[in-house]
Image (tube, grey):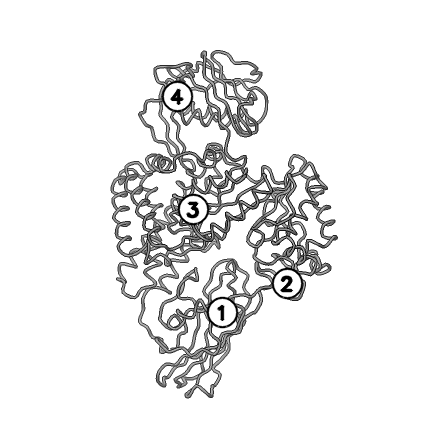
Amino acid sequence: MLLFFLGVCLPGWGFAQMVLVENGKPKADIRLADDRPANRQAADLLNHFIRKMTGAELPVAGGGTSFRKGTVLIGTPTEEAGEDGFLIECRDGGLSVSTGGDKGAIYGVVTLLEDYLGVHYYACQTYTLTEQPTLRLPALRRAETPAFRFRQTFSYGNDDPIYVQWFRLEQQTEIFADNLWVHTFNRILPAAQYGKDHPEYYSFLNGERRPGDHSQWCLTNPEVFEQVVQKVDSIFRAHPGQTMISISQNDGNNTYCQCDECRKVDEYEGSPSGNIIRFLNRLAERFPDKQFSTLAYLFSMHPPKHVKPLPNVNIMLCDIDCKREVPLTDNASGRDFMKALEGWAAISDNIFVWDYGINFDNMVAPFPNFHILKKNIQLFKKNHATMLFEQVNGQRGTDFAEMRAYMLAKLMWNPELDEDSLMQSFMEGYYGKAAPYLYRYQQVMQGALLASDVPLWIYDSPISHKDGMLNRRLMKVYRELFDAAEEAVKDDSVRLAHVHISRLPIQYSELEIARTRTDGDLAEVRQKLEVFRERAARYGIEHLNERNNRIADYCRLYESRYLPRPNTNKAAGARVIWNNPPAPRYRQIAETALTDGLFGGASFVESWVGWEGEDADFVLDMGEEKEFQCVESDFLLQSGGWVLLPKSVTYSYSQDNRTFTEMGTVELAEDRDPSIKFVPAKVVANQPVRARYLRVQVKSIGLCPPWHYGVGYPAWFFVDEVKVE
């Protein structure tokens, strides 16, 4: 646990209305209005920090019924605050922390500690306070109600109970029965259990029923509804204290049922959400005392034209496809989401927004979106969102993870707070003397991002920004600022660690960009790789992305795959002749990417050449007859992006580009591993052959299989390099 002992003058010092502790001795007691757990937790939290500051502990007892001198009264109800809100009053020598309901007493104590007793929490087990023998409180009266009734961030600090209390965060397990809160179709009616005997329960796609882990339900099938009713009833009976459940589509896009009956509803309602809301409304009518949440996500993001959700149907609206470099009102993807949000707001006051602030493919990479946090949260509030989940910072090492979670938690409680002040307050407490340099870093990168006109999105790669916010000149500025930050706290091991961890995304970016260039200093790249490897290991940062690819594996792979080596590829620079070319967006890069000696990374934004649901067939013209014995291609596996391995690859050679002799075929086995992989397909002839032309034929799997997110839709495959040796 991190403690800084600061010599500060507390608010109201010298004008005390109440003394809590004097010379290390308790001068007040705590009385609980009733035995609700939140009241006890509030008392424990207050005593926890009083003990750390003074060494004393206030006696706690029940039976608190009235305000009186020398007593901290916790948990009396108040109508001046709503759910999770509070009223704090200090007068006449006494203190009252009243609750508007649920955890209001806890959050009132947090405000008391933070704003009146000088305790500041910044991150998981990271806070500051002042050791002192005496604690006094000024006269005060303060009431607050949060902007959203449910607030959550996907932050690694969530395993610290005090962190969760301090930042007023809630967990889905608290309100969703059996933790059924998103992508629940397959949990409720598992395709593995029902699909064989009842394929009619599942989506009709591309000419047939396709049961699968990520297939959707046929929502117009009356048997499906009755099966779900039975399951929902049993779930609520098994969890009598909970009244909310998510009945929501499986993960995957455009996999909704397109049978005749479902299609009729979709066409009438103008969106696949129409079928979903009709189904949810029927459940809501069957269980009027329960809350039913459902996703408005990808294909169901836009609201229906006619049917309206009943009041006990909660719309969980997701902005997953939006770019993040500007607020949601300021680019095309954001405006499309805003159209959906405003449409839902016109027919519902029960909206749960799922917002994203994380780079799933490269979590340890810069993601400078701090300037849009406040504006977007204000938009959610304005458009009837009452619940908000910010999916950010799933692990240590993501870009300024602690600061992003800190700012979001504060803004979810009060969207009117000044985001720049929040950033500076956090930096001063968390980074100390390094704060001015890191604040400057954020300002420079934000300006560079906006000036570059390059989008920022949740499947981003540093390579996308190598000519923008991560260009050579700016990277030099970033290095200088981090060098200065490290120097400023070199004698403070805790804050130096904070700076080191915050520097990892820019160090990872240096490595990623270096592997796309051939003019780098090999020794310098090796040294940067070692620093990145050592620091990630030292601070326990293990994974690079949502697919759980490990940093240690990345560093080993970097040495063998990316570091420059003598180019022995006899097809280097070969002219490509297309028999079946790649998808249009990859054709320009494909002319050189297949033989340029540069290998693609975890994201398919560079080097990779892709085909969607089709076979590949191309010929490499090496310019002259050459002798070789081995041919190898490199394929990407990234199942989360619908990028799967092909069935097979066949190599043939020719002297005249008319008559070809087969050299060999490699069959590629299905791989369901969610990790990102680079899979070779290599053929070695029994003896050397001579030829000018090499033909590569890749057989696609066609459609995504039943276990995959894209069940029934074309699968991609990607190849980045063909080596002839």
The three-letter amino acid code for the residue at tag 3 is: Pro
Q: Nearer the viewer, mark 3 or mark 4?
A: 3
Q: Earlier in the sequence, mark 4 or mark 1?
A: 4
Pick whichever, 82 or 124, lies toward us.
82
Position of the N terminus by quadrant: top left
Give above or below for 66 relative to 147. Answer: above
Residue under label 4, please give it: 54
Q: Earlier in the sequence, mark 3 or mark 4?
A: 4
Horizontal side, residue 305 vs residue 681: left or right: right
Q: Earlier in the sequence, mark 3 or mark 2?
A: 2
Which of the numbered marks, if any, corresponds to residue 327? 3
Hey, which quadrant is residue 345 in on the image?
A: top right
Q: Earlier in the sequence, mark 3 or mark 1?
A: 3
Horizontal side, residue 521 vs residue 316: left or right: left
Q: Earlier in the sequence, mark 2 or mark 4?
A: 4
Classify mark 3: residues with Cα within 10 Å, few (<14), some (14-19) or many (20+).
many
Hey, which quadrant is residue 597 in on the image?
A: bottom left
Instruction: Report how far apart the C-alphas of labels 3 and 1 lie in the structure.
Output: 33 Å
Residue under label 2, please give it: 205
Residue at screen point 57% across, 18% down: 62
Instruction: Report how far apart the C-alphas of labels 4 and 1 lie in the structure.
Output: 67 Å
Q: Nearer the viewer, mark 3 or mark 2?
A: 3
Residue under label 1, please give it: 611
Where is residue 22? Give x, y as percent: 39, 15
Where is residue 308? Give x, y as percent: 64, 44
Give above or below for 70 relative to 449. Answer: above
Classify mark 2: residues with Cα within 10 Å, few (<14), some (14-19) or many (20+).
some
SS for tag 1?
Answer: strand
Where is residue 367? Give x, y as percent: 39, 49
Pick whichever, 381 or 131, lies toward us.
381
SS for tag 4?
Answer: helix
The answer to whether marks 2 and 4 mark residues whose Cβ atoms lie closer than 8 Å is: no
